[in-house]
Image (cartoon, rainbow, N blue to C red):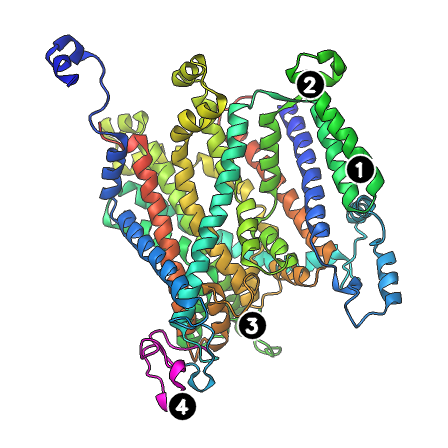
Amino acid sequence: MISFIGRSIVQKSITLFFVSVVSFLIIHLAPGEPSQVDPMNPKFTPEMVERFQKEFHLDEPLYVQYLYFYRDLFTGKIVSWKDNQSVLSKIWERFLNSLPLFIVGTLLTWTLSFPVGIRSAIHRGGIYDRSATFFSYFLISIPGFFFAYILIILVVRVLHVPVIGMETFGMGDAPWPNLFMDRIWHLLIPSVLGATGGIAVLSRYVRSQMLEVEGQDYVRTARAKGLPPDQVHYKHALRNALLPFVTMFGLILPGLIGGSVIIESIFSWPGMGRMAYEAILARDYPIILTVNFLSAVLVLVGTFISDMLYLAVDPRIRL
Amino acid sequence: MMEKPLNENTEILDAPQAPKVSRFVQGFRLFNQNRMAIVGLVIFVIFFMTAVAGVVLTSGQDPVFNPALVRLQEKLLPPFSRPNLETLKAHEAPTLGIYVLGTDDLGRDVLARMLQGAWVSLTVGFVAVGIAVVVGIFMGGLAGYYGQGGVRYDQILAVLLLLSGIISFFIGWVRLGGGLFLVGILCFMLSLAAGYANKSHLVPTWLRKIAFSFDTLIMRMVDIMLCFPSFFLILTVVALLPASIYNIMIVIGLTSWMGTTRFVRAEFLSLREQDFVSAAKALGVSNFRIIFRHMMPNAIAPVLVSSTIGIATAILTEAGLSFLGFGVPPPYATWGNILSDGKRFIFDAPWLTFVPGVAILIVVLCFNLFGEGLKDALNPKLRQE
């Protein structure tokens, strides 16, 4: 057990190191320069370009830049090239904006997909199963931005509530129930959009897990004993079908930092995804690299947690 | 002619025989039962022909459907509306007499633009997945078949020297780079000589030890690639590179080979231990032939399924990138940028959103359904006895 933990920590640190090297190389070897040091940019004089290069070590060789960058990242001193503000505090601020979207989206995904998937599996081949299957393919296939516009048209035309942004502008002195409802309306559509793909994929997965368990001998035995169907489905089959999903709790971690670029830019939601998108457009390398690094950390931590959870819940797995 | 005497012999009848129905026919039967998959296949064929017709009809000096023709007096006309022929010159009139799918904010015919965009979606899907599958099969095959073989320290040394030589050559240290490169080549030759010509005394023993296996190397590369948030990585690279459709194809392909690698590796690991592979080896069949002629046909099923679904994902990714304004430069139409241009007129001209949106939805849906049908058809558990 201890050796497994130790080994996976060492392995994951090595992976993380290579991720940091690769992302650094991708960003710096791509053609083009950040606008502040682009000699073609008429806004900057050669002296300013030189000062900027010195300030951000752009005149050093690549490996020195790499060392400087990660030293700054780990000491928390890293600043954005665009406005000289601390990258970590910027990310934290945007993270807090994205968090409600993530929480509501995850709750929707996990509460809706289980009932749908289980019901599909129990009534396999029936009309409910087939329509749920088709509907989930529909949701997987629909482009997020197109779906977003359909929902915007629906909500704005039918319900007459504004949905763009985090809150309606100029509601400062409205009574708090109105403010609250306003926030809920603004939150709802982006999170539903964020959850659609997840609901479709997860409910399919629940269905196939459930079908696999239902086909096993002990379930047939339980049925042959004459147990009521509900007890067989929910007590015997479901409990074992749930096993792989416990581990998926670890895998939702990376979603914390990703945010959705497309959904956040459609809804003008000042979250992580939009910040990353703006940073890419402005070639703000510190922000791009930090977001990338943090999300790689979350992926690795997520897989580690899911391994641990698997060990904890499945007594058949021994190291 | 040979079968008749065999059939008369009852003893041989009891011996195991090849199944009467071939695997392909059985798979086809299963596929045929899946109505949604058939619909998917039909839509895919229609889409394919539309895309090919589209690229023929919209390209050239004087195309049948001109997607770039601006008619400002005809802007934002709804679908099936008639052109006002008095204000148009003869060559500006729409080919079919009416604007079947309406016009956009510059008066361009949406049908012509959709036809042009279909080809982009098709090629992005196929080329990107093609790249991913080729890389995936290569890496997975290497890991699965040669997995036990290791990488020796002298090889690592040679590769490191070569790489650092190339890198320092490119960042301007020409002399150091050249030197490192030469030393690297020398190391490479030495290790080759030590490996194949039985001159192992050329390389010290501690350098000839195995550092790690190919399998570990490739699987760690897969792990590293899986750490990147994929859409964000694609977005970064596409934004930094010059705008071109080929960059998008290559980038999507190079960021989505990991699944195929894992499938192929897992299949190869189990196939390698089977008797027919040992038999082929004993017959002296070359490794190349064993991999591609004997093992690959048995390992291809999951790859086929995942690449069909991969095409759907690639089309969606390209549409998302076009929507954000990256990718194909403006005068050229893609479904994503038709939708992106139309979003400003969403309440006045909803067809600019709905036509490309529904088209993407249908094509992606057909690939997903087709892939799912294929999965069932190729699944040995679902075959009848």
Do the dots labelled 3 and 2 sit on one chain?
no
Label 1 or label 4, whichever lies nearer to me, is: 1
The magenta stretch is B77-104
x, y percent for residue B59: 44, 66
Mark 3 to mark 4 CA distance (whole Å): 52 Å
| Element class at badge 1 | helix
Q: Which chain's residue wears label 1?
A: B
* Mark 4 closeness class: few <14, some 14–19, many ≥20 residues within 10 Å: few
Magenta span dominant secondary structure:
loop
| Residue under numbered circle 3 | A179
Residue at the (45%, 67%) spot, across then down:
B60
- Kind of residue at disc 1: Gly
Magenta highlight on residue B97 = yes
Q: Chain of mark 2?
A: B
Residue B210 is at least partly visible in this image: no
Q: Residue furthest bottom?
A: B86
Mark 2: amino acid: Ala
The residues tagged by marks 1 and 4 sit, at their Cα atoms, a distance apart of 68 Å
Total of numbered circles in the picture?
4
Question: Which numbered dot is residue B87?
Answer: 4
Q: Position of residue B151 (x, y in %)?
A: 65, 23
Asked whether, in this view, residue B280 is left or right of residue B258, the answer is left
Q: Nearer the viewer, mark 4 or mark 2?
A: 2
The residue carrying mark 1 is B178
Q: Is residue B297 left or right of residue A277?
A: left
